[in-house]
Amino acid sequence: MQGGRSSSWQRAVLALAGAALAWSLASAQDQRKSEAALNTVRKEIKELETRLTRETARRDEGAKALRAAEVENADATRKLADVRAKLNDQRAARRSLGEQTDRANQRLTAERAALGSQVRLSYITGRSEMFKLLLSQESPATLGRMLVYYDYLNRARSARIAAVGADLTRLSALNADTERVEAELKDLEAAQATQVAALAKARDARQAVVTRLESSIKDDSATVAKLRGEEKRLTDLVEQLRQLMAGLPVEGDQPFATLKGKLPWPVQGRLAGDFGQPRAGGVVKWNGVLLEASAGTAVRAVYHGRVAFADWLPGLGLLVIIDHGGGYMSLYGHNEALLKEAGDWVQPGETIAQVGDTGGAPRPALYFEIRFKGEPVNPHTWITRPTAAR
């Protein structure tokens, strides 16, 4: 009877182990499928970006020139930010090394003083103190105690000598590290100067293109045609992205649809253009909001999602589009630099870009939209905090 129970228990354990193995293999297979699907979508988005660039060049030489100037400007901005971040890290490292060196010097000074005191004591008692002690007439008990004291003294002296040696070695290593960091700082400061010059050159080139484009638009009808063309390109892009992202479900803590009235603004700034208000003489209306903010201000994702697009688009410049699932997308345009790529996951409040004036904007601002199944919706109904009035 007991053998039967043991056999049943073993079969149950084997069944559980088999089920766990099967689950693990299925999980690994699902992960490989998800990664393959993501790689496929990323490839298709990259092809879409390339096609957009090609179509922009074919349709409008001015837009092509503006894209080249603003992408160059964004690249210089990003490189300068990287150099400055490294500079900050190295300056912090230098401060830390300085503090460690000061502490090591203080400890070395203290150890040298203590060792000096022991050496002076040894000199005063004579170098043959142990031999004299043995020849003294002290009692065996007193002699034993004195031998123990001398053993303690010698151990302490050896420890002091070892501590001084260790501190000297540590100090030497700290000095070498400080010299290395100083050399790296010098190189980084030179790189920063180079990037600042490159950024100034890129901004000058961009401004020249913008001025040329503005002079080429002769009247309001040309402006309206330009805005309508840009709006159609954005609508077409969003629809294509919706189809591409359909196979990559987005799962957050809550569905996006339940967050109405609870989202934060991606930046805090003056409302310079509002949803539904007329632009270009009233023929075209805003599909989102335009929030003026200082160049370089962090642009933050309003909610969890996956980046569907991160590239340049006529009229909006450097643009990020995030798919939040359930048919919802958020759009962030006119950025100075993009910090995410298509396929990247983003968390609520995560920095995805920096405010700029790309796409021919007259001043630094963020253009922000929310779309549901490709159609723009009023962002104000989704936001919990007000922004500055016009």
Image (tube, rainbow, N blue to C red):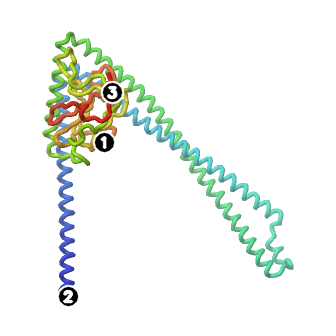
* Label 3 Cα crowd, 10 Å radius (few <14 / some 14-19 / many 20+): many
Instruction: State the residue position of label 3.
Output: 356
Residue 127 on image: x %, y % = 80, 67
In front of the other: 367 or 243: 367
Amino acid bearing label 3: Gly
**CB-based contact (under 8 Å), mark 2 and mark 3:** no
Mark nearer the N terminus (2 vs 1): 2
- Splitting the image into 4 quarters, where does residue 374 fall? top left
What SS does tag 1 mark?
loop
Q: Any mark on residue 329, and which?
A: none
Amino acid bearing label 1: Pro
In front of the other: 5 or 222: 5
Residue 228 on image: x %, y % = 16, 21
Residue at x 50% of width, y 35% of height: 186
Instruction: State the residue position of label 1.
Output: 348
Residue at x 83% of width, y 73% of height: 132
* Label 1 Cα crowd, 10 Å radius (few <14 / some 14-19 / many 20+): some
List the single residue furthest toward the top.
Answer: 218
- Splitting the image into 4 quarters, where does residue 381 fall? top left
